[in-house]
Image: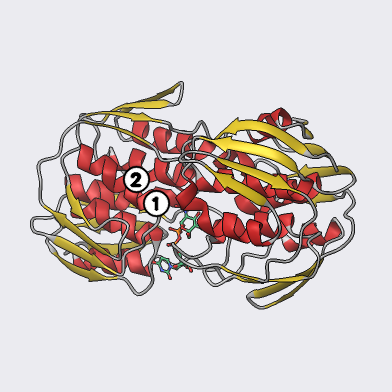
Amino acid sequence: MQTILIQGGRPLSGTLAIHGSKNAALPVLTAAAAVPGLHRIENCPDIRDVHTTLEILTHLGASAALKDGTAYLDTRALVSAPVPRALACRMRSSVLFLGALLARFGRAEVPSPGGCVLGLRPLDQHLSGLARLGVDCQDREGRMCAEGKPTGGTVILRCPSVGATENLLLCALGASGPVQILGAAKEPEIVCLAAYLRACGAKIRGDGTSVLTIEPAELHSGEGRICPDRMEAATYLCAAAACGGSVTLTDLCPQDLEQVTGTLSKAGCAITPTETSLTIRAGALQSPGMVVTGPHPAFPTDAQAPVMAALLRAEGTTLFHETVFENRFRHVKALKDLGGEIRVQGQLASVRGVQALSGARMEGTDLRGAAAMVVGALGAEGTSVLTQAQHLERGYADLVPGLRALGAQIEALD
Ligand code: UD1
């Protein structure tokens, strides 16, 4: 899917089920490398990053298949071979193979990871944390080469990095003594990873808080389920807000979306939750004021771009303060091409609501940026063309069919 054609300006309506979370599925699948045995993981989204993770596992000697949303893995024969650069550079989470392979083999070699370009994305917290656990990790021409059986100990994270927390949690599975991670990230995807590891016998406490404790334990085969994708849900909520209409999303966890639903409610959308669903009714929008991104439970940086796109026509001025990544306004140019009035100064973007938007030609920049362009185009009159749309395949299962099911005029051209 390189190019998407969108005829905007039509309200959305209908009901859609949300898939499993990309950002939970990737670490859980990677965790299977640390745990020799059979793994059955339900609700895995059929997206490119999941397939890349399965390819890496297969390269390392596992058998891995995804059938009807369930991943079946046999990691008993897996070895600690170098992760191929061609696979590692497709996504950020490939770096988690460091922790997983170290836990099981005391040795790992992983090239610098890829993923969305959002400015500098250092790995210092991953590497200093691993060093704290007794692992020697060196960068040899763009390959991280780590060696050493992890010991116990306390790691203090300077910032609550999701990836570093996951990497250290995985590495700690093989530690000879208890490990404490202070300043850990609290995202729901980490809670999902910890739940899966507990199903494999791991002794983990404190997930969802900033103090994680991992004690040595025998690990074994496991079964589990990936939590709902809050970013996929946020994207559909934004599409409904941008277009107007009434949409119900099922199979999700409303608590994990409180920042996004709170912002859209302030903007005038009526949002009704049940235990596992959300219904949004959207009409004319007004500015919700200021949106400040931050680590969970603050407003998620991944939802910043789609929410900005949803609010291009909201009356008044909305201010976005991006505090997590230094270069996360790459979607702004495309949204301006649609007619959005946006000014960016450093980490701040101010959006002054306009009466109407009109279709434009846009180029996808990154996963959530491209999603924002789809949302913006759905709210614009006339035809939009999104090129470089393949970014979306990394993280959205069936985005185009999903939006079509809600009445959007959207099609993938190739
Ligand atoms: C994960 C998510 C991504 C999301 C991000 C923040 C996955 C696959 N990706 O990315 O979708 O946008 O969390 O919620 O789950 N940092 C350092 N040093 C480090 C590590 C991180 O300074 O060693 C900084 C980063 O530059 C960034 C901040 O910490 O400013 C948060 O990054 P982090 O939580 O690590 O994001 P990722 O795990 O890469």
**Horizontal and vertical percent for residue 14?**
68, 31
Find numbered disc 1 in the image and state the secondary structure of the residue it sits on. Answer: helix
Residue drawn 20% across and 62% down?
135
Q: Is residue 376 left or right of residue 227?
A: right
Queried on whether the Cβ of the residue with tag 2 lies below 8 angstroms from ligand 1, the answer reads: no
Image point 57% across, 34% down: which residue?
Answer: 397
Left or right: 162 as drawn, with respect to 406: left
Q: Residue furthest top?
A: 67
Rendering quadrant holding ligand 1: bottom left
Residue 188 is marked as 1
Residue furthest to the bottom? 345
Residue 67, x across and y down, in percent: 43, 21
Residue 114 visible somewhere in the drawing: no
Q: What secondary structure is found at the residue carrying circle 2?
A: helix
At 38% from the left edge and 67% from the top edge, which residue is drawn? 160
Q: Is residue 355 above or below residue 367?
A: below
Towards the viewer: 364 or 344: 344
Tally the numbered discs: 2
> What numbered label is drawn on residue 394?
none
Q: Compared with residue 158, is residue 111 higher up or lower down, i.e. above or below?
A: above
What's under tag 2, amino acid-wise? Answer: Cys
Quadrant that contains the C terminus:
top right
For residue 12, which quarter of the picture? Answer: top right
Residue 138 in view of the camera? yes
Q: Label 2: how many residues lie within 10 Å, few (<14), some (14-19) or many (20+)? A: many
Pointers 1 and 2 in contact (CB under 8 A)? Answer: yes
Q: Could you tell whether 28 is left or right of 219 in the image?
A: right
Query: Which of the 4 quarters of the picture holds residue 24?
Result: top left
Give the distance between the C-alpha atoms of the residues marked 1 and 2, in whole angstroms.
6 Å
> Label 1: few (<14), some or many (≥20) within 10 Å?
many
Q: Is residue 43 rendered to the left or right of residue 338? A: left
Residue picked out by circle 2: 192
